[in-house]
Image (tube, grey):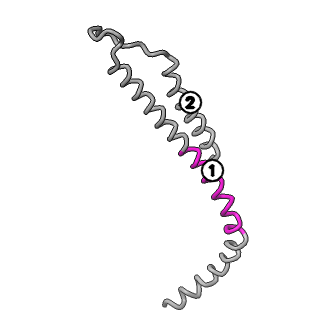
Amino acid sequence: GPYALWLGLDNQIILLVPLFELVIIPLFPKIEYFILKALRAIGVSYILILLALLCMIVLDLVEHFVPSGDVCVTSMPEISFLYYSIPLVFSGLAAALSQLYILEFI
């Protein structure tokens, strides 16, 4: 029973040893480098997206809670487009990084 099964698997395991020693183990650092490099860049792009969201939250808070000179005025203070370009740059960099390094997985 179990001895016959072990004898059949023993030959297959012995055939896999050279495959691991000559192919898989030498290639592992290279595979690990390519995978970690892409994942690191995708992580940086997520951090850039979070920075863009935080910038938009701060701009929204400034727009709603900072009075524009006269307290009785109900109009919102105007914020320059230059301030809105900061989160746009962060989100654009995040999109470029993620698209560039996702193509390495293909």
- Looking at the image, how many numbered discs can be counted on the residues? 2
Amino acid tagged 1: Lys
Disc 1: CA contacts within 10 A as few (<14), some (14-19) or many (>=20): some
Q: Is residue 35 magenta?
A: yes
Q: Residue at x 55, y 87 (%)?
A: 6
| Residue at the outermost right position | 22
- The chief SS type of the magenta part is helix
Assess whether residue 38 is covered by the magenta stretch: yes
As drawn, is 85 to the left or to the right of 22? left
Q: Residue 70, position in %: x, y?
A: 31, 9
Image quadrant assignment for residue 26: bottom right
Span of residues in magenta: 23-43
Check disc 1 and report its element: helix, strand or loop.
helix
Residue beneath label 1, please?
37
The three-letter amino acid code for the residue at tag 2 is Gly
8 or 14, which lies in front?
14
Compared with 99, 104 (above or below) is below
Q: Secondary structure at mark 2?
A: helix
| Residue 62 position within the rendered picture, expressed as x and y whole percent measured from the top left | 38, 22
The CA distance from mark 2 to mark 1 is 20 Å
Q: Are marks 2 and 1 in contact (CB under 8 Å)?
A: no
In the image, residue 53 above or below residue 67: below
Q: Classify residue 3 as left or right of residue 70.
A: right
Q: Which residue is mark 2?
A: 92
Question: Which residue shows up at 54% across the image and 89% down it?
Answer: 4
Q: Residues within 10 Å of mark 2 (few under 14, many from 20)?
A: some
Q: Give the side of residue 101 with respect to residue 47, left or right.
A: right
Q: Whole-percent x and y of residue 77?
A: 38, 13
Q: Earlier in the sequence, mark 2 or mark 1?
A: 1
Residue plotted at (44% across, 16% down): 79
